[in-house]
Image: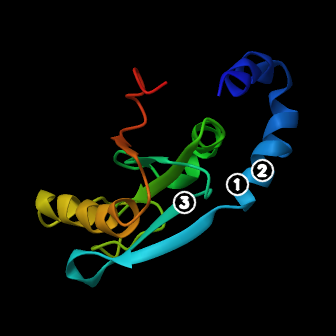
Amino acid sequence: MNKHKASWLRREKAFAAFATGPLLDFWHRREEREFTGVGNLTLRYVRFTSPQHKRVVLIVPGRIESYIKYPELAYDLFHCGFDVVILDHRGQGRSDRLLEDSHRGHVAEFAHYVDDLETLYLKEIVSGHYQQRYARRPTRWAGLF
């Protein structure tokens, strides 16, 4: 992990090369998956896994965010020894929406977000071999490293 952290300091100077090289190669290896949430909506998520990893981070983006916003974060976490799972909430990103207007956010009950997240947690996190499990909003990384 320390070797990977040291690379962060050099990355900014050649970010275009990083983004079109190692980061893009990493992103192409993502596993795009889906599950059925409350009300039979199809919810989509991505994951990056390695049999050597014993820790996992479930990333829960906020409103109007999609997993496609987080390749660099997923890259860094993965190379620090974490499996990474990123959800597109109902009505966000590539997940199904309740309204025909895909630009309007809508959820019938806030509890549906919670129920969807529980379904994903049981499917991907609990059933895994993980010794440590984390769930985070992307803006709250203090203390993780």
14 left or right, relative to 29: right
- Distance, label 2 to label 1, CA atoms, is 5 Å
What residue does disc 3 label?
A: 47
On screen, residue 88 above or below 35:
above
| Quarter of the rendering occupied by the N terminus | top right
- Distance, label 1 to label 3, CA atoms, is 10 Å
Q: Which mark is residue 27?
A: 1
**Badge 2 or badge 3: first in the primary sequence:** 2
14 left or right, relative to 24: right
On screen, residue 3 above or below 130:
above
Looking at the rendered structure, the secondary structure element under dot 2 is helix
x and y, in percent, of residue 96 in the image: 38, 74
Circles 2 and 3, Cβ within 8 Å, touching? The answer is: no
Q: Amino acid at mark 1?
A: Trp
Foreground label between 2 and 3: 3
What residue does disc 2 label?
A: 24
Looking at this rendering, what residue extends furthest in the bottom direction?
A: 40
Looking at the rendered structure, the secondary structure element under dot 3 is strand
- Distance, label 2 to label 3, CA atoms, is 15 Å
Q: Amino acid at mark 2?
A: Leu
Circles 2 and 1, Cβ within 8 Å, touching? The answer is: yes
**Badge 1 or badge 3: first in the primary sequence:** 1
Circles 1 and 3, Cβ within 8 Å, touching? The answer is: no
Q: Quadrant of residue 127?
A: bottom left
Looking at the rendered structure, the secondary structure element under dot 1 is helix
Q: Amino acid at mark 3?
A: Arg
In this orientation, which residue lies closer to the viewer: 1 or 111? 1
